[in-house]
Structures are given as C-alpha cells and as structure tokens.
Amino acid sequence: MSESRTVRIEVPVLARVEGEGALDLTITGGRIEDLRLRIFEPPRFFEKLLEGRACAEVPDIVARICGICPVAYQMSAVHALERAFGVTVTPWIRAMRRLIYCGEWIESHALHIHLLAAPDFHGYDSAIAMARDYPDEVRRGLRLQGLGNEIIRLLGGRSVHPVGVRVGGFHHAPALAAAQSLAAKLEAALPDARELLRWTARFPLPADEQAFTCVALRHPDEYPMAAGRIVSDGGLDIDADSYESRFRELHVPHSTALHAQLDGEPYLVGPLARVNLCAAQLPREVRDTLASTGIHFPSRNMFHSVVARAAEIHHALLEAIRLLKAYTLPDSPFVPIEPRAGEGAWATEAPRGLLWHRYRVGEDGRVAWARIVPPTSQNQARIEQDLRASIERIGAQHDDAHLRRHAEMVIRNYDPCISCATHFLRLNVTRV
C-alpha cells in the first residue's frame, strides 16, 4: 500500500522574488507526477484602468506597473499610440528613447545579478550575507545600478516611475553639460562592466542543458531595445501587429498569472533569448570579452542568463556613452500629436524580455481598449517546464528543503516580476 505525505514549507512572501506564489510538487516513486507554479497575486486591472483615459495620461499610468522597469512600459505604450496616430518621431527622440532604455537595462540587470542571483550561486541567503565575503563586488553592483538610475533621471525627471516621457517624445531636453558629465561617469565605469562580465562567467553555474524556443526582437541595424521584428530560433519573423496571430495567452486553473504560448508551446523571452538570437549585434568589445570567458552563445543552459545580463550591462553602458557623446540640443524634445481614432501595437525589450502593447483609441482621443502582455507572464510556462527538467536532473528524491532551495534558484534565474504578470516561495510536496 502506498504512503502519501504532504509537506508545506513557509518562506517569506518576498523571497528575493517580487510577488507571492507557491510551487506544488507531486512526487511518486522519486518521479515528478505533477508540478504547478501557483501565483496568487491579485489581478491589478491596469488594462481596464486605462480605458477612458486621455492618451497623454497613458505613459505615467503604465509606469506604475513595475517599479524596476517603468521605462519599458512607457516605451511600448508611446510607440503603440504613435503608430495608432500615424506619427513618426525625430532621430533625436529615437536616440533618447534608446538612451533611457539603456539606463533601465543597467539598473535592472545590476540589481538582479548582485542582489538576487549571485547569492544563489555562491550559497548565501542574501546579498547582505554575501557582502561580508564579496564587499567589492556588491559595491560594484550598487555603483552600476546607481548609474542606470542616473540615466533614467536625466530624461525621466526621476529614476522611479519617471515622468519625463510623453507620447511624441519627452517633456524636456537635458542640458548639454548634464549629458557630458554623465558620459564621463559612464566611461569611468567601463572597467566595472568588463570585470562584472568575467565575474559572472566564473560563477559555479549548474550544467543544465535544455531544449527551449527563444523569442526576441531583431533589428537590422542594432542590438534590439525599442524596435524590431519579433523573431524566434524556430523561424518566426513577424511585426508586432501580428503578435496575436501566433502567440496566445491562456488561463490555467492553478494561477492568477496568465501563461503564454507560441504556436501552442512554451517559449523563452529575456536576456538569454536576446543574446542567443542577436549576439552578432553586440559591440565587438562585448563579444570579445564573452568569447574569452569560455561560455559560448547560443546557449541551452538557462543558468547562462546571468552571463547574458552582464553582457547586456556592458553593451548598454557602451551604447549610452555613444549616445551621450553625440548629444545635441533639439529644436523640440517632442513632435506634436493629434489624437484620433485608431489602433496600434508595439513591442520593446524590457530587461526581463519582450513586452507587447496594443491600444485602441476612440474618436475622442481616449483609450477605448488596451492589452498588455508582460515578459514574466510569457515566461510562466517556460519556468514550469524548466522546474520539471531541472528538478528531475538533480533528483526529486532530495528532501524538501533542498528541493525548495533549488526551485527558488531556478525561478529567480528568470528575474520574474510576479505582480507585473497578474493582469516567493511556499513549497507543497506530496510524496506517494
């Protein structure tokens, strides 16, 4: 007669993951019978809140969806609305949008690597505990994160929920002296970025090769941030308008966060997917440093995401320096907008991956309907797939504490924003 037992392990609500959830595992004879990542953050209804709002209000509202990556939500929104209105912005505006996005990549990736991921790989419960043995590395991470915030503040007015972005451009243009001063600070930080990339490659990263589909933007002239076509390593190549023809969001009974599928299958978005698909567009300096680490891309090891994030910090720093050195004062920091009835979709690359928006605007110039698909919800099914494969690799016979630690590491590796995905970790194990 088989014996069944259920173990419930309580962990802090914020276990180095933004949001609240639980992982249910049913294990029979040492094998996983069922695995469910349950998210029970309440839906936040941002899409509904946008209905009836003037288009000028949208950038400031969507910035509140995420405190770590508000720029991403603003960039996807303004591009989609401009497409609905048939507006083309100036090269200056396009360059400054890329610059502010560089700031967000730097601050978000630096925070994740140093405060969330590195403690996992080095066996610490927190970054505070790790700082006792790695003080210089933690200080370096905080310096880089601060520089990313400075870039956002330059154009956004403040680094958290910036208010400088508007449909059609920016509310103001930074002073030339401020741009030059920030460029000098970023140049001084380049050695930090190079060493960070080498440091992450030396992490004791588990060898965990898996099969998965990568999805990201691809642009013919640049490493993707705020523009490009949606592509995959399986041959997908579509415009943002066609997103819904191939991608589908679906409800699952065990989670408030939606899952997403590409042609009926899970897929990966985020830094590893971007580097896998677009490494050739990284600056030569970044590619050379990556090559010297001995970690090769494309990679099928999800734990190489941390190295991809470090490479993107190095790239974003170089790109921000280039843009700031070329900075000039514009005739106007925005182009005039005439709201009209229309519909537009756009995708950009948030730090965590592809972020897709679609808006329908009425004759009164107000939002009639909105849909936002964040990267974390797109990764939910892939995370469950990864958890199953990774736990089976290490052995489901391990005790519950060991399984919990490993599951948390796998989940954190995606840098999930659980609240953003509800349009860590309690572990429940049933052993039979």
Image (cartoon, helix red, strand yellow):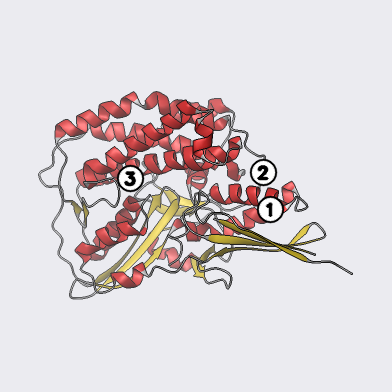
Compared with 192, 121 (above or below) is: below
Q: Indicate the quadrant containing the N terminus: top left, top right, bottom left or bottom right.
A: bottom right
| Image location (x, y in percent) of residue 90 | 19, 48
Numbered circle sitting on residue 389: 1
Between residue 218 and residue 296, name the one nearer to us.
Answer: 296
- Relative placement, left or right, of 358 versus 329 is right
Q: CA distance from mark 2 to mark 3?
A: 31 Å
Amino acid under disc 2? Asp
Q: Which residue is rendered at x = 50% and y = 52% of the image?
A: 17
Amino acid under disc 1? Ala
Numbered circle sitting on residue 237: none
Name the residue beneath numbered marker 2. 208
Q: Which residue is rendered at x = 58% and y = 70% of the image?
A: 254
Compared with 4, 121 (above or below) is: above
Name the residue beneath numbered marker 3. 101
Q: Which residue is rendered at x = 39% and y = 34% of the image?
A: 142
Neighbor class of circle 3 (other Cα within 10 Å; few <14, some 14-19, many 20+) is many
Q: Secondary structure at mark 2?
A: loop
Amino acid under disc 3? Tyr
Q: Secondary structure at mark 1?
A: helix
- Relative placement, left or right, of 332 versus 232 is left
Compared with 188, 55 (above or below) is: below
| Image location (x, y in percent) of residue 68 | 38, 49
| Image location (x, y in percent) of residue 372 | 38, 64
Residue 286 figure quarter: top left
Neighbor class of circle 1 (other Cα within 10 Å; few <14, some 14-19, many 20+) is some
Q: CA distance from mark 1 to mark 3?
A: 34 Å
Label 2 or label 1, whichever comes before in sequence order: 2
Q: Indicate the quadrant containing the C terminus: top left, top right, bottom left or bottom right.
A: bottom right
Q: Are marks 2 and 1 in contact (CB under 8 Å)?
A: yes
